[in-house]
Image: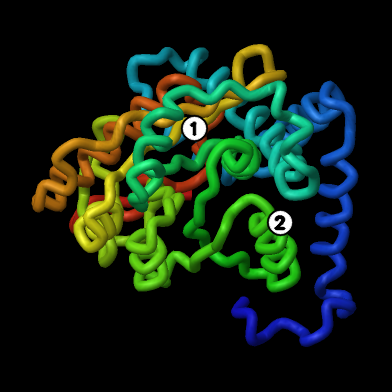
Amino acid sequence: MSKRNWPSSFAHPRFWPAWLAIGCMRIGAWLPWRFKLAIGRGLGLLAWWAVPRRRHIVDTNLRLCFPELSDTQRDKLALDTFKANGIGVLETATGWCRDPRHLRHRVTFKGREHRARLEAEGRGALILGIHFSTLDLGAALHSLFFRADAVYRPHNNPLFDRFMGQARKEYFDATLDRRDLRGVVRRIKAGHAVWYSPDQDFGSKASVFAPFFGIDAATVKLTAKIARMTDAPVIPLIFHRNPDNATYTLEYLPPLEDFPSGDEVADATRVNAVIEAAIRRHPEQYLWLHRRFKTRPEGEPTLYPR
C-alpha cells in the first residue's frame, strides 16, 4: 500500500497496530538486559513456529550458503538465526528509544584509526554496512565514537516511518532515501561519511550478478558507482553481539584498495567477499530472512518456490 492511500490522521484505527508496536518497543527498550534476551529469544521462537514462509527462506539460504554443514547443523543455525533476530527486535528498540551512552561500557571498537585518519584528512567516505540483526543498535553505538549519515529505505507505514526516522536522527547526522543518489554524492563530497548497506536484492536493473557464498547473487552496482563519483574511500564496518550476549564489538576494516576497478562484476564480487567474510564470523546474526537470491539470471528457476 502506498503512503498516498493511508489516512491523513495518525489517530485512525488503521494506525493502531503501529501505535501498539511503538509502545511495545518503548517499553522493551527499558527492560533489564536479561529480560530483553529472554523476550527476544521467545519472539524468535514464535516467529520460527508461526511464520513457515520465513522459515523456508532461511532454510533455503542456509542450504545454499553452507553446503558443508549437515542437516542437523543447518537446522540449529536456522533456529539460532530466528533467536538472534528476535533479540535484534529488542536491540533495535533500545537503539531507537534510549540514549546509547548507557551501553558505552558494553562496546569494544576496533580499527578506529582507519576512520580517524580519514577524518583528520577532511575526507568523506562510504561506510560499507551489513544487515546484521544488530544493525540499528550498532548504528547507535557507532555514534558514540563517530558521526555519520545513512542511506535507508522508507517504511511503508507512514507512522512507523516517522517513528523510525525520528529515532535515527538522534544518531545519524542525516538520513538519505536510497533513491537520492545526488544527496549521497553531495554529502560525501562535503566531507561526510555515509553508511550504506548493499547486501540486499534490489532486482536486475540495478545489479550485476556476482558470487555470494558461491551463488550468483544480484548485487547492486551503486557501491562502486558512488565511490567513482565521489573519489571517496569505501571502508567496511562490522558489528556483532559477542558470544557472552552482553557486549558488542564494532570494527572498521582498512579502506578497500584500488576500488573501484572499473569492472562492475569484479567490484561487486569484491564487496560480496567482504560481506561474506564478516557474516561467517557470526552467521546466526545475519538477516537470512531476506530472499537474498530472489533475482536469478535469465532462464534460471526461482530458488524460493513456495
Residue at image location 79% in from the left, 44% down from the top: 98
Nearest to the observer: residue 87 or residue 188: 188
Work out whether 64 lies above or below 20. above
Nearest to the observer: residue 239 or residue 293: 239
Crowding around mark 2 (Cα neighbors within 10 Å: few <14, some 14 to 19, many 20+) is some
Q: Nearer the viewer, mark 2 or mark 1?
A: 2
Residue 275 position in % (x across, y down) = 36, 34
Q: Earlier in the sequence, mark 2 or mark 1?
A: 1
Residue 238: give its label.
none
Write down the residue under mark 1. Answer: 59
Residue lying farthest left? Answer: 262
Are the residues at dot 2 and dot 1 in contact (C-beta closer than 8 Å)? Answer: no
Residue 175 position in % (x across, y down) = 55, 62
Nearest to the observer: residue 120 or residue 6: 120
Write down the residue under mark 2. Answer: 167
- Amino acid carrying mark 1 in the image: Asp
> As drawn, is 53 to the left or to the right of 278?
right
Secondary structure under badge 2? helix
Residue 29 position in % (x across, y down) = 83, 40
Residue 237 position in % (x across, y down) = 43, 35
Crowding around mark 1 (Cα neighbors within 10 Å: few <14, some 14 to 19, many 20+) is many
- Residue 91 quadrant: top right
> As drawn, is 297 to the left or to the right of 106?
left
Residue at image location 90% in from the left, 45% down from the top: 27
Secondary structure under badge 1? helix
| Quadrant (top left/top right/bottom left/bottom right) for the N terminus | bottom right
